[in-house]
Image: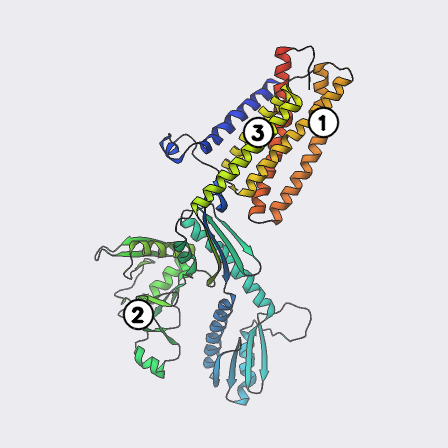
Amino acid sequence: MLQFARWKIAVILLLLLTSSYYAAPNLLGDSLLARLPDWMPKQKINLGLDLQGGSHLLLEVDVQAVINERLQSLTEEVRTALRKQRIGYKKLGIRDGALQVEIREPGQFESARELIKELNGGGVVVLGMIGGAAPELEISTAGDQIEVRLSDDALARRKTSAVQQSIEIVRRRIDELGNRESTIQRQGEDRILVQVPGLDNPAHLKAMLGKTAKLSFRLLDQTISPAEAKAGRMPIGSEILPSDEPGSPEFVVRKQVMVSGANLVDAQPSTDSQTNEPVVLFRFDSVGGKLFADVTKVNIGKPFAIVLDGRVVSAPVIRSAILGGSGQISGNFTYQEANDLSILLRAGALPAPLLIIEERTVGAELGADSVNTGRNAAIIGFLAVAAYMVLSYGLFGLFANLSLVMNIILISAALTLLQSTLTLPGIAGIVLTMGMAVDANVLIYERIREELANGKSPISAVQAGFDRAYGTILDANITTFIAAAIMFQVGSGPVRGFAVTLMIGVVTSVYTAVTVTKFIITQYLRRVRPASIVV
């Protein structure tokens, strides 16, 4: 006998009401949703770039900049080490992607080589040698010259690390802009795909992602003017940096970074209480706060350059020791510029510049057209499936259509709660799910027809039809679910959108096609008690 426990009935009804409750906002306009009470759900399905418009950027991580930065750092390490041991050298610099230095005295050559070798953790790569963990540096010699370059393993590690860090920082920056529906993923070895649906200012996005946001605090070199430095009298350990303001003078700045922006834990836009100009308030962690206090304590009266991406934002004079681990950056900002700089500093500096390789903007009107096209396709698909089921199975086809309606409601509610991004391929997955859902009903109804042809009563035929078709339905949908899961795991962009709706649809269609349809038929048989049924 067909039996449904009360708790099963309660679950079906509760699931229908709950899913309808969360899916309903998708049918309402934004203005109406805004007027609803706060306790009511207001979340809608996230629409992808192809459905609501937005920005598409393909970025390339400038890995060479990371390598050059490491070589520059290594140059300073070698210079300091050789001077400390009073080893004469010349022509120290970076040439052909490697650090090169010539040792003046032949008798000091081995000492210099061993000293540089210690910078490599005491190891040296011997070309052609197999086995063992390769150190970061490859050191070779020719005459009185020592050449140091990054090993292949070190280059690969730095490339992978730079791309991974860049992805995380790009994600943080976009999240700070208030958009949490973006797609950010790696493409190839050194490229990042960024898709931000609904963005109405792509130029602002490019500006936010185009800045490396490397902040440092350095001392100005007051022993020489910028004009003298340009004339060829640049002191060792100093460099000329431009001002962040067009037309402002350049600065001679010490290369040594006194405090790094890596120690920042917070940055917020604010207004200077004296000048009423927008500024950025920053705060260091305990390590950065101590460094900042120590530097300002011993350099009172000296100008302190605040350097952002190789440009001097401001160069205030240290009036007193700054012990609180916090300070402010001023630079004739607008409030928007101060807010943007705060976002960049909070998100962290990119390990390398990002180059825009490809840029596309999908207009909101084009996205709306895609939504209408997808909606029309779904409606036509539903009507065609519903008509086929009624024409093929009569009243029982209508029961299958009722289950199909619940299936669509469940999918909508799941996409809304999961905040999964719906794309055009995702809509295709929903349309495909509708066909798969009634396909299960077709299997069940054909089994019922066979049982009726064998002379069984309506109730016995229905029970046998559901029991015998269940295994086939489950097997077919499990294999589909596995295929969708693999697509989600290895695919990207539209493929993953299709896979998400397909996986959700497989689960909901099995439930509605079997459990909900069986419940509807059971209620019909119990209340009408027909002597015979036509399927």
Q: Secondary structure at mark 1?
A: helix
Give left or right: position of 25 versus 475: left
Check disc 1 and report the residue beneath it.
469
- Residue type highlighted by circle 2: Asn
Residue 341 seen by the camera: yes
User: Which amino acid is tagged 3?
Assistant: Leu
Q: Are marks 3 and 2 in contact (CB under 8 Å)?
A: no
Residue at numbered disc 2: 299
Determine the CA span between mark 3 and mark 1.
25 Å
The disc placed on residue 90 is none
391 with respect to 41 (left or right): right
Q: Is residue 333 above or below residue 501?
A: below
The residue drawn where x is 65% and y is 26% is: 514
Q: Quadrant of residue 244?
A: bottom left
Q: Earlier in the sequence, mark 1 or mark 2?
A: 2
Q: Secondary structure at mark 2?
A: loop
- Residue furthest to the left: 274
Question: In the image, what residue occupies the spot 40% across and 71% down?
Answer: 256
Observer-nearest of 83 and 462: 462
Closest to the observer, 297 or 275: 275
Q: Position of residue 334 (x, y in %)?
A: 29, 56
Give the CA separation, mark 1 to mark 2: 84 Å
| Distance (Cα) linking label 3 and label 2 | 78 Å
The residue indicated by pointer 3 is 383
Q: Position of residue 47 (x, y in %)?
A: 48, 42
Q: Position of residue 32 (x, y in %)?
A: 38, 32
